Amino acid sequence: MTKRERFTSVMNFKLPDDRMPMMEWAPWWNQTIQRWQGEGLPSNLQGQEIAEYFGLDRLFSFGPPLRTAEFPKPVSHGAGVINEKTSYDDIRKFLFTDELIERCKGAALNLKEKHEQGEYAVRFGMDGFFWFPRTLFGITEHLFAFYDCPELMHRINGDLADFWLRTMEVIFPILKPDMVGISEDMSYNHGPMLSKELFDEFVGAYYKKVVPFIKQYDIKILVDSDGDITKMIPWLTEAGIDGVYPLERQAGVDVVQIRKDYPDFIMLGAYDKMVMSKGESQIREEFERLLPVMRTGGFIPSVDHQTPPEVSLENYRLYLRLFEEYCVKAVK
């Protein structure tokens, strides 16, 4: 089977005939790569070249930026750009332009040939309806905005939904991605950061605008959220979402229980990154925990966030060796 065929098979709850996909859904931390370069990783490798070096299946992610180069930068990490001096009307001209869609079209054309040959799977990445307003308001002000300026929140998300529909109308006839990943980060280690009522009004309602178009192409839709997403799974499925990632173990996420409760829900991630520096016994034990779920289909194991710099190159190679062992074991 090709690498793309393995990915799409599992996403459709069918096990490949040779092994499960071996992939990282996110790139490594810069500090991790710097450590590994000091331990023998060639310093000239970047991005997907590192995945190829380690023998991983590639998951290419692409999508249009939402901002032009003229978009104002926040004064600090987590700060917003909408404030007492700058309104949404002031920055709207730097968002959602046709030029951004054309740039995305170029990326799709570059990926098309090797994708169709099965050399890699492709994820179409979307900033979601919780995530994107936060980048405009800032982390703290965003949470107040649900109550202080709901009309503006709806206007922003309406514009965002329209942009995604315009983009997909151009891109999907050129390159049909194997999944859509919607970046949200709506949860923390104790559950959702918003109520079901707020989710339905400000997030789920806009999923229902874009999901039907995506489903016309028979593409799986997964939400990317850190923290414990468990309570939100019924909210997501009601809005047409097929699955989630990365399913962080440190937040208490239990993929074994999720599979029992939601047998048709797709999952990506779930491998506890915190055991990767602790030697073969604990690395293997974590794969044993995931193996029963791997055998059900609809689940692609991967590090539950980016591999931390505490993991040596030697231990990462050990992780990869056991990863391959269990990816074969899962289909036999």
Image (spheres, rainbow, N blue to C red):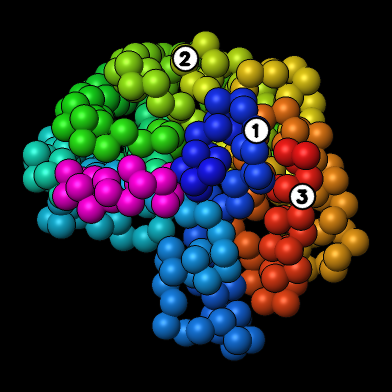
- Where are the magenta residues, as a range? 104-121
Q: Secondary structure at mark 2?
A: loop
Q: Is residue 14 visible?
A: yes
Q: Residue furthest right?
A: 281
Amino acid type of the residue that numbered disc 2 sits on in the rendered structure: Ala
- Of the two numbered discs 2 and 3 in the rendering, the one whose residue sits closer to the viewer: 3
What quarter of the picture does the C terminus occupy? top right
Is residue 116 found inside the magenta-colored segment of the image? yes
Q: CA distance from mark 1 to mark 2?
A: 27 Å
Question: Picture coordinates of residue 325 (x, y %)?
Answer: 76, 55
Question: Picture coordinates of residue 116 (x, y %)?
Answer: 33, 43
Horizontal side, residue 329 vs residue 12: left or right: right
Q: CA distance from mark 3 to mark 1?
A: 13 Å
The dot on residue 239 is: 2
Quickly name the residue at label 3: 326
Q: Secondary structure at mark 3?
A: helix
Q: Nearer the viewer, residue 226 or 60?
A: 60
Question: Picture coordinates of residue 292 (x, y %)?
Answer: 81, 34
Q: Verify CB contact (< 8 Å) between mark 1 and mark 2.
A: no
- Of the two numbered discs 1 and 2 in the rendering, the one whose residue sits closer to the viewer: 1
Amino acid type of the residue that numbered disc 3 sits on in the rendered structure: Tyr
Quickly name the residue at label 1: 15
Horizontal side, residue 183 vs residue 96: left or right: right
Horizontal side, residue 104 vs residue 120: left or right: left
